[in-house]
Image: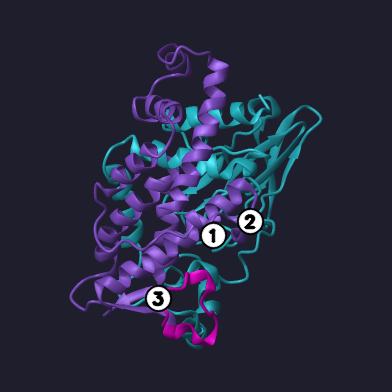
Amino acid sequence: MNKPENRVDKIVSDLLKGRPLKLRGGDAEEKAAITMAARLAAARQGGPQRMNPAFRKRLAQALESAPKEPWMTRRAALVAGFGLAATAVAGGIVSRALEPAHAPARLTGGPVNPIPGKWVDVAALTDLVEGEGKRVTAGGVGAFLFRRGETVTAVTSICTHLPCELSWNGGHGLLDCSCHPASFMPDGKSTDPTYPLPTLNKVQVRVTTAGRVEVLGTA
Amino acid sequence: MNLDRPPDEQAVGPEETENVLQLPANARAADIALGELELVYAFIYARVGNRADAEDLTQQVAMKAIPRLREGSPASAIRGYLFATARSVLGGFWSTRLGLSESELHEDLAMALPQGPPSEARADTVQAILAQLSENYRRVLELRFLHGYSLKEVAADMNSTVGAVKVMQLRALRAAAKVQVEL
C-alpha cells in the first residue's frame, strides 16, 4: 500500500466517490499528480459547480449574523473599549460586532472553573469511542469528551466566537460551530492556521477507578 | 488598499481602519457577498474536486473576508478581495494537507482571478490537457475520471492488469500536470 501508485489510487478512488481529500505522509512527493487528480475529478462533474442549497442557506445565515452596520475594525473596537465590554457580556451584539481574531483574552483555552463546582458523573469510559467526540452536560457546563486509551480530555461545547453550541462532525473529526463557518480540533484549537479563533476552553474531567467519567460542572 | 494581496499579507494593527472595503450603499454586504461566494465555491471546487472540502474552504473565505467589507465599494473590488482570500485559503489548504510550506507549492496554485462567472472553459482546458497525452495515458484518465470506471473495468477495457493500470494512472497524472504547466 505504500507504493506511490497505491497511495495515489486511494486518493483518486476517494475523490471519485465524492469524499474529501485525506492525504498522508509522503503524499507531498506526488503533489502534482494529486492536484491534477482533484482537478480531473472536478471536471467529471461537467460545468461549474453551484453550492448545495442547504450549504448556501447555512452560509446565508452565517452572513446574516453579522451586524447591519459597518463592521467594526480592531482599532474602533479598542478605542470604544468594547474589548472589555465583550469580556463582561458573553454574547450579544457587542461581541458579535468584533472580529474573531480580536476576541478578548478570556478565550484562551484555559480551564472552566465553576464556583461552586461539582464533579458530575456523565458517562462510563466504555461509552466513549476513540476518535469520536461525545457531548455531555454537567449541570451548567456543556462539554465534548474525547477518549484516548484510558484517558479522557474535554473541551467546552460553546464556540469562542459566537456563543453557540458546537456539534461533532464525525466525517471530519472536528467540532463545528452551528452559527458560523468555524471548526475546532478535539484539543480545542481552531482549524484555520491563518485566521485562528481562540482555543476552546478546557473542561476538567477525570476517570474514576470504577471506570466512570466525571466532569467538573455545577450542581 | 491593495486588493491584489491576500488578506494574510495585509497589515494589521492601527492601520486596519483603512483595510476595510466599502460596499455599495444600497446593498447589504451579506447579500452581495453571497452571490460572489457562489463564484468562489465554483472556483474552489474546480481545484479540490469534492464538495466537502469546497464547502469548508468557501466558509473559510467568507469568514475571513466578510468582516473586512462594508458599505460603499464596487462589486469588482469585492470580487477581487474574495478571490484573493480564496487563493490564500487554498494555498493554506494544500500546504497543510501536503505538509509543505506555501513557498514549496507549485505555481498551479497561484490561480488567475476570474473576470466573470465560471464557464465551460474549464472542461475545455481539461480536454486540451488530455489531448496532449499519449494514447494510453489519455485513455486511462478518461475512463477513470470522466467515465468513472473502476480499476478493474479500466484494466479489462485496456487489456491490462489492475497493477499495471494503477502505475499507468499515476504516470498519466504526472504527465498531465506537466502539460498543464505549459498551457
Observer able to see residue A219: no
Task: Report whether A135 appears left or right of A178.
Answer: right
Residue range corresponding to the magenta coloring: B1-18
Question: Going by the picture, which residue comes out furthest to the right?
Answer: A209
Residue at 58% x, 55% y: name it.
Answer: B105
Dot 3 alpha-carbon crowd within 10 angstroms: few under 14, some 14 to 19, many 20 or more: some
Q: Colour of chain A?
A: cyan
- Mark in front: 1 vs 3: 3
Which chain letter goes with mark 1? A
Q: Amino acid at mark 3?
A: Leu
Name the quarter where the N terminus of chain A is drawn: top right
Asked if residue B1 is positioned above or below residue A211 in the image, the reply reads: below
First along the sequence among labels 1 and 2: 1
In space, the residues marked 3 and 2 are separated at their CA atoms by: 36 Å
Residue at 53% x, 78% y: name it.
Answer: A83
Q: Residue B4 lies in magenta, yes or no? A: yes
Q: How many marks?
A: 3
Q: Position of residue B129 (x, y in %)?
A: 39, 42
Instruction: Determine whether label 1 and label 2 are within 8 Å by CB.
Output: yes
Q: Position of residue B79 (x, y in %)?
A: 31, 67
Residue at 75% x, 28% y: name it.
Answer: A211
Where is mark 2, residue-wise? A201
In space, the residues marked 1 and 3 are separated at their CA atoms by: 29 Å
Task: Report whether B19 appears left or right of A67.
Answer: right
**At numbered mark 3, what does the secondary structure look like: helix, strand or loop?**
loop
Where is mark 3, residue-wise? B3
Dot 2 alpha-carbon crowd within 10 angstroms: few under 14, some 14 to 19, many 20 or more: many
Q: Amino acid at mark 1?
A: Thr
